């Protein structure tokens, strides 16, 4: 049983493929343990850096680049078991960048949708090399939108690497408009704008639907005690009520 007024704590981090056996992996294992989160979303990671004793679901390992055993673009960890797990979303989505599931939390049963939206140059200069900048990103948003709004009866948390700063910074206006349209009208962002102590606007985000309300978003440093960078993304902790 959860305390009646306990807030839901969510960790969110792109760990840049850190593995358990590495110094960077040890950093994230320690940080995730300290967070005491109910749910954690990792992008570009391995399942073995999560706290022990939880339950992990992952996106498909094939994201149209070379496959490295153990790597997944999106992983979700929960203290409680997952059900209604979906690692596809839609066959029209660029593959290997989506996983969703429902788990019990202090705020009741919640659907979590983990994403890693392709960056602007996905399959432009590497991979299949048959795209123009932002093509894969826009295709993903187009087919993500109906998945987000198909069931309004269940509170949902959308989270992961969006590969866009919010409000719009350097991305083209039509790309930002596509993201806004994909979220509208059901989802409200907890991670838009300046975050205290963060060096830049976030590109990793969390948005909520239904009765969920963001309480606080905290910056998590991506440097260790010696100032060494552990990832090219900083982390976030979001509290919901």
Image: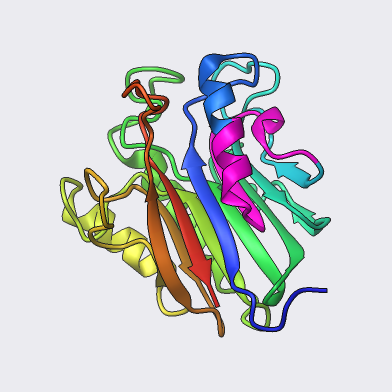
Q: Of 111 and 30, which appears nearest the observer?
A: 30
Tell me what residue is drawn at x 41 percent, y 28 percent. 231
21 left or right, relative to 172: right
Q: Residue furthest front?
A: 225
49 left or right, relative to 238: right
Magenta stretch encompasses residue 45: yes
Magenta stretch encompasses residue 4: no
Residue 195 in which image quadrant: bottom left
For the N terminus, the quadrant is bottom right
For the C terminus, the quadrant is bottom right
Residue 141, relative to residue 209: is it above or below? above
The location of residue 123, given as percent across then percent down, is 40, 26
Tell me what residue is drawn at x 71 percent, y 83 percent. 4
200 left or right, relative to 224: left
Tell me what residue is drawn at x 49 percent, y 79 percent. 213
Q: Of 158 and 91, which appears nearest the observer?
A: 158
The location of residue 107, given as percent across then percent down, is 67, 77
215 left or right, relative to 80: left
Visible residue check, residue 147 = no
Residue 15, relative to residue 86: is it above or below? above
Q: Which residues are magenta?
A: 29-52
Residue 2, relative to residue 92: is it above or below? below
Visible residue check, residue 133 = yes
Tell me what residue is drawn at x 65 percent, y 31 percent. 49
The location of residue 23, given as percent across then percent down, is 53, 16
The location of residue 206, given as percent across then percent down, is 46, 60
Colour mode? rainbow
Q: Of 66 and 165, which appears nearest the observer?
A: 165
Residue 26, relative to residue 96: is it above or below? above
Q: How many marks?
A: 0
């Amino acid at each position: 049983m959860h305390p009646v007024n306990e807030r839901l704590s969510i960790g969110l981090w792109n760990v840049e493929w850190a593995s358990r056996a590495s110094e960077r992996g040890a950093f994230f294992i320690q940080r995730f343990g300290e967070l005491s989160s109910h749910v954690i979303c990792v992008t570009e990671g391995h399942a073995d850096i999560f706290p022990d004793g939880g339950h992990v679901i992952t996106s498909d390992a094939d994201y149209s680049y070379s496959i490295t055993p153990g790597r997944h673009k999106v992983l979700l960890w929960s203290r409680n078991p997952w059900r209604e797990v979906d690692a596809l979303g839609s066959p029209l989505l660029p593959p290997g960048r989506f996983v969703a599931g429902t788990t019990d939390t202090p705020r009741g049963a919640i659907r979590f949708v983990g994403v890693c939206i392709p960056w602007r140059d996905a399959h432009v200069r590497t991979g299949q090399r048959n795209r123009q900048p932002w093509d894969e990103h826009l295709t993903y948003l187009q087919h993500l939108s109906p998945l987000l709004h198909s069931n309004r009866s269940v509170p949902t948390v959308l989270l992961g690497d969006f590969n866009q700063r919010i409000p719009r910074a350097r991305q083209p206006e039509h790309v930002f408009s596509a993201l806004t349209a994909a979220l509208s009208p059901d989802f409200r962002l907890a991670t838009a704008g300046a975050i205290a102590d963060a060096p830049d606007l976030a590109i990793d985000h969390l948005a909520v639907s239904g009765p969920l309300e963001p309480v606080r978003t905290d910056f998590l440093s991506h440097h260790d005690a010696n100032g060494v960078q552990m990832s090219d993304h900083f982390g976030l902790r979001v509290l919901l009520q």
